[in-house]
Amino acid sequence: MQQPLVGIIMGSDSDLPVMQEAAKILDEFAIAYEITIVSAHRTPQRMFDYAQTAEQRGLEVVIAGAGGAAHLPGMVAAITALPVIGVPVKTSSLQGLDSLLSIVQMPAGVPVASVAINNAKNAGLLAAQILGVKLPAVRQQVNAYKKALEQMVLEKATKLETEGLPSTL
Ligand SMILES: Nc1c(C(=O)O)ncn1[C@@H]1O[C@H](COP(=O)(O)O)[C@@H](O)[C@H]1O
């Protein structure tokens, strides 16, 4: 088995439907990752141990998703020198705005890179881009992904230009 380069953690198993999108992208790029549940609030010692050992265990990027008072990404970033990507997870009460603000409003000195609410896919992509700085094979995959995205949009544009509006509109 390959050494995991990315650690995907989330505050609760209820975040899994959102966070699995990060794992899917890493699978697509054949990037090894580990995935588990760690909560700064509910398992503070586990969170501390996870963050403190992340680097020596060979991880290079951490993706941390949490909803509500999303302290997990910031607390992990406070402990490790690895880049931390936060995923604000939408919960029922405040539509994810609470998590987004908890993640982006870090004090100077302790940055967390935040993606959009529920956008764990972008967290996976950003992790791949970070790894791509030193892994040309990963960088190539990111470039291929961007090309495919461009192609998809161009095809849609051509379809709209040639066929006009769909009748259902
Ligand atoms: N924000 C955090 C933290 C943390 O930041 O440490 N730990 C759990 N949670 C979040 O609480 C929400 C509700 O969790 P439950 O569904 O288990 O009640 C989840 O979105 C989780 O990420």
Image: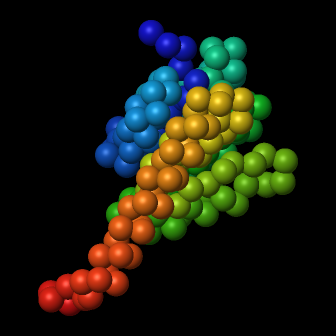
Camera-nearest residue between 82 and 94: 82
Residue drawn 40% across and 35% down?
28
Colouring: rainbow
The reply to whether residue 55 is visible in this rendering is: yes
x, y percent for residue 102: 61, 58
Q: How many marks?
A: 0
Q: Quadrant of the C terminus?
A: bottom left
Where residue 3 appears, x then y in whole percent? 54, 14
Can the viewer see residue 63 in this picture?
no
Q: Residue at x 69, y 48 (%)?
A: 112
Q: Residue 68: x and y, percent?
A: 48, 56
The answer to whether residue 99 is left or right of residue 164 is right
Tell me the quadrant of the picture where the N terminus can be found. Answer: top left
Q: Quadrant of residue 118?
A: bottom left
User: Residue 136 in the image: x percent, y percent?
Assistant: 65, 30
Name the one closer to the observer, 100 or 58. 58
**Residue sitting farthest toward the right:** 109
Q: Could you tell me which residue is drawn at 61 percent across and 37 percent down?
A: 139
Q: Is residue 112 left or right of residue 126?
A: right
Residue 135 figure quarter: top right
Residue closer to the observer: 102 or 146: 146
Look at the picture and state if 105 lies above or below 27: below
Query: 127 or 168, which lies in front?
Result: 168
Which residue, as the protein is rendered here, is positioned at the far left?
168
In the image, farthest residue toward the top: 1
- Residue at the front extreme, as displayed: 162
